[in-house]
């Protein structure tokens, strides 16, 4: 394989989008990007992962739950977002099945800065195991803006196979 320049990738993506507009499908179409790395030994060199914030919302159907104090719960209720208060989290009582059910129900979590340090104590390692540890949000931030920022962020990681997957 050889290097592909950015303009060629943009042209291909634009062609795919134009084709999608011409023939509307009854399902959500996705494009997966895989990048092969040459002269990179994952056994010897570091594996890496990270996130990229896109300029537009990539996953509009991503469900976000607010784990918050009274202020953030009221703000989430006003915005029509799902939320869990501190009392709701205490009711879970570190029950692994209930925590797993909560983690499965939502795609991402946002938590009040004051509550972030209490979450491992309240929920245990349940959210961290599934890779859904909450993103902190302060009282100055807007919950809807934070949720849209999460929806526009994609994660990438390099595993043992020499392909960089984007999800």
Image (cartoon, rainbow, N blue to C red):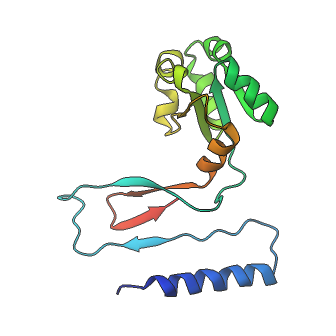
Q: Quadrant of residue 137?
A: top right
Give me the residue at 46% from left, 20% from top.
117
Give me the residue at 58% from left, 85% from top.
12
Q: In which quarter of the image is the N terminus?
A: bottom left
Give me the residue at 62% from left, 42% from top.
146
Pick the residue in front: 145 or 42.
145
Where does the image place residue 150, in percent across and percent down from the top left? 59, 47
Residue found farthest to the front = 140
Does residue 53 sit above or below 8 in this rendering?
above
47 lies left or right of 119: left
Would you say residue 105 is visible in this rendering? Answer: no
Does residue 133 sit above or below 19 in this rendering?
above
Count of residue discs = 0
Residue found farthest to the left = 44
Does residue 13 sit above or below 101 in this rendering?
below
Give me the residue at 53% from left, 38% from top.
132
Where does the image place residue 75, in percent across and percent down from the top left? 74, 29
Where does the image place residue 109, in percent across and percent down from the top left? 60, 35
Would you say residue 164 is visible in this rendering? Answer: yes
Where does the image place residue 130, in percent across and percent down from the top left? 50, 38
Does residue 68 sit above or below 9 in this rendering?
above
């Amino acid at each position: 394989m050889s290097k592909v320049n950015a303009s060629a990738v943009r042209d291909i993506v634009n062609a795919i989008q134009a084709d999608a507009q011409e023939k509307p499908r009854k399902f959500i179409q996705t494009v997966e990007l895989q990048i092969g790395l040459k002269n990179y030994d994952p056994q010897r060199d570091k594996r890496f992962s990270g996130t990229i914030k896109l300029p537009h919302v990539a996953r509009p159907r991503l469900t976000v739950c607010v784990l918050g104090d009274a202020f953030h719960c009221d703000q989430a209720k006003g915005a029509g977002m799902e939320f869990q208060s501190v009392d709701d989290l205490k009711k879970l009582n570190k029950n692994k099945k209930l925590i797993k059910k909560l983690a499965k129900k939502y795609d991402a979590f946002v938590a009040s800065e004051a509550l972030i340090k209490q979450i491992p104590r309240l929920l245990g390692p349940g959210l961290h195991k599934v890779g859904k540890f909450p993103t902190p949000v302060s009282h100055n931030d807007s919950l809807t803006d934070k949720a849209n920022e999460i929806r526009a962020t994609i994660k990438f990681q390099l595993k043992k196979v020499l392909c960089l997957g984007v999800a």
